[in-house]
Amino acid sequence: MTRREADSGKIEETGDAARPRKIIHIDMDAFFASVEQRDNPELRGRPVAVGGARERGVVAAASYEARKFGVRSAMASVTARRKCPELIFVKPHFDVYRQVSMQIRAIFSEYTPIIEPLSLDEAYLDVTDNLKGIASATQIAEEIRAKIKAATRLTASAGVSYNKFLAKIASDYRKPDGLFVITPKMGPSFVETLEVGRFHGVGPATKERMNRLGIETGGDLKAQTLDFLQRHFGKAGAYYYWIARGVDERPVRANRIRKSIGSENTFAEDIFTYEAACAALAPIVAKVWRAIENGPVRGRTLTLKVKYADFRQITRARTHASPIASLQEFEALAFSLLGPVFPLEKGIRLLGVSLSSLSAEEIKADGQLKLEI
């Protein structure tokens, strides 16, 4: 086999032997906020936050105009307002977002059946052997971005590479409305220059731990032994070892098994007693159970999430030997995890529960399903 890496950066393959995969990661630009700006001309060019404007609200998405002020998703609304006094809060319209997501998914399907959605606005595509027989993954990404813009009047950023890890990094590299390609030739050296905080799978807490160990870049990560990384990061150590070398063998999975089902709620007033917390938790538990009771899927691990008034957050989990069989059992387990949280030093502003270790041979979905209350 011979491999041709065109001067334009396109990944092209010739020959019949084993060859690098061609993976595209598509990520819509500020999706929720962009949909709102598209549908309401008065919002265009202005800082917009999708979410609740009330004191206990949270930003679900922010337009790029708002991001210039430091407004980010998952930020408390009061903090966002402080950073950007002119911020416009818009109530989310999830039915519209889902409809647009279906339009985008239909465009993906014109090129490949191997689509792994990560959320409404983000997906991996394996186009190694695509439906249109196009040799260049870059050309496919360009066509998809153009079709999305024509069909939805929204922009998407795309990353093209030979594995999922690098394709995701590439899609974020020239946002918004950008396209970036990381070829097999440039992959390993490209990773070495990046801060570890930009790696998918390295969150803020892990980044901080790595920094304390003197690991700040991909090059620093690559310098560590597999034993060292497994000693400090457990099972994730092997993943970090290989991505530091530009290696990621995970396939694009067209039907990912759902990992968890969860729901949470932020309260208008802090909760201070166990009785009040149980009363607030009961409808959250019931909502999660309704999502699974009519299907064959069941879970063994219940995780309780508690966020305090000072934004400190804890989780407590318990795993059963067999799947949880009823709402009563689910609720009793949730309350048993809640009990040891009391007495409180700070009030509770948010409670959430999720069910994981799901078991159902035929139940497939787009990753985690998060329910809004």
Image (spheres, rainbow, N blue to C red):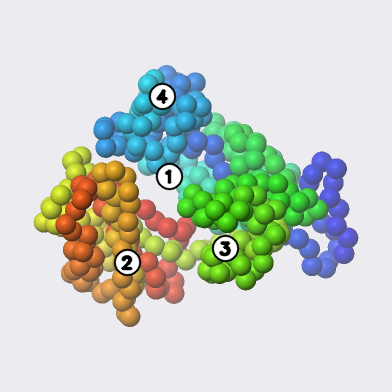
Q: Residues within 10 Å of mark 3 (few under 14, many from 20)?
A: some
Which disc number belongs to residue 317?
2
Amino acid beneath label 1: Arg
Q: Nearer the viewer, residue 288 or 200?
A: 200
What residue sits right under mark 3 in the picture? 253
What residue sits right under mark 1 in the picture? 98
What's the CA distance linking mark 1 and mark 3? 21 Å
**What element does badge 1 sit on?**
helix
Which disc number belongs to residue 84?
4
- Callout 2 touching callout 4 (CB < 8 Å): no
Amino acid beneath label 3: Arg
Left or right, 154 with reference to 164: left
Left or right, 204 with reference to 8: left
Amino acid beneath label 4: Cys
Q: Residues within 10 Å of mark 2 (few under 14, many from 20)?
A: some
- Callout 3 touching callout 4 (CB < 8 Å): no
Amino acid beneath label 2: Ala
Q: Mark 1 or mark 2, which is nearer to you?
A: 2
Q: Position of residue 42 (x, y in %)?
A: 42, 19
